[in-house]
Image: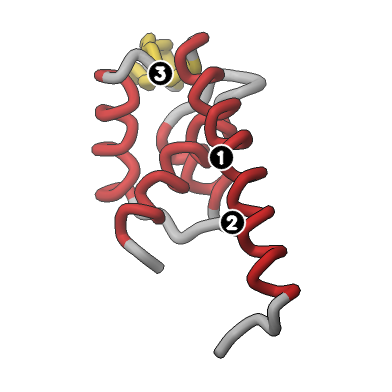
């Protein structure tokens, strides 16, 4: 898969995990395991990038005597998911057109 495409998909998958509730790194990875391969070394730069783009905010919470960092989606992050879904609808039209012409060469 194209690196740029995969990067965009990972971003939106992470935002989708956080759509309904805040979460922390390890849980985000486990929530995405069946969808896309993701390691800690991949996830944390994604989270940092999404935070710098105002798609996420963070807060810390005590868990078993340690602070755990939680990530929470923002309105900007929700807009990003919506924009992706609109782009995907356009992509589906293209894929359907290609498929109707005989698919792969």
The one of 43 and 95 positioned closer to us in this rendering: 95
The residue tagged 1 is 87
Q: Please tell me which residue is depicted at 31% across the width and 60% down the height of the picture.
A: 3
Relative to the observer, which residue lies in front, 45 or 4?
4
Mark drawn on residue 55: 3
Q: In which quarter of the image is the N terminus?
A: bottom left
- Mark 3: give few (<14), some (14-19) or many (20+) Cα within 10 Å: many
Mark 2 and mark 1 lie on one chain; the one further toward the N terminus is: 2
Q: How many marks do you count on the picture?
A: 3
**Distance Cα–Cα, label 3 vs label 1:** 18 Å
Which of the two residues, 81 or 41, is positioned nearer the viewer here?
A: 81
* Mark pair 2, 1: CA separation: 20 Å
Q: In which quarter of the image is residue 60?
A: top left
Q: Where is residue 9 in the image (x, y as percent from the top left)?
A: 46, 47
- Tell me the residue that label 2 is attached to: 35
Task: Using residue 100 as the reference point, say whether residue 79 is left or right of it.
Answer: left
Colour style of the rendered protein structure = secondary structure
Are the residues flagged by discs 2 and 3 in contact, CB closer than 8 Å?
no
Pair 2/1: label in front: 1
Instruction: Give how far across and how far down residue 63 sits, in percent.
Output: 45, 19
SS class, disc 2: loop
- Give the mark, 2 or 3, whose residue is nearer the N terminus: 2
Residue lying farthest bottom?
Answer: 105
**Looking at this rendering, what residue extends furthest in the right direction?**
100
In the rendered image of this protein, does residue 83 appear above or below residue 65?
below
Write the residue at 58% across / 33% down: 17
Q: Distance between the residues labelled 2 and 3?
A: 21 Å
Location of residue 12 with respect to 59 vertically, above or below:
below
- Report the residue at 34% width, 13% height from top: 54
How crowded pointer 1 is (Cα within 10 Å; few <14, some 14-19, many 20+) is rated as: few
């Amino acid at each position: 898969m194209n690196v740029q495409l995969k990067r965009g998909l990972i971003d939106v998958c992470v935002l989708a995990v956080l759509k309904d509730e805040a979460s922390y790194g390890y849980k985000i990875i486990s929530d995405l395991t069946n969808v896309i391969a993701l390691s800690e070394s991949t996830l944390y730069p994604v989270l940092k990038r999404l935070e710098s783009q105002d798609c996420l905010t963070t807060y810390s919470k005590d868990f078993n005597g340690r602070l755990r960092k939680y990530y929470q989606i923002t309105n900007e992050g929700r807009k990003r998911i919506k924009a992706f879904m609109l782009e995907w609808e356009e992509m589906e039209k293209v894929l359907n057109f290609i498929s109707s012409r005989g698919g792969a060469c």
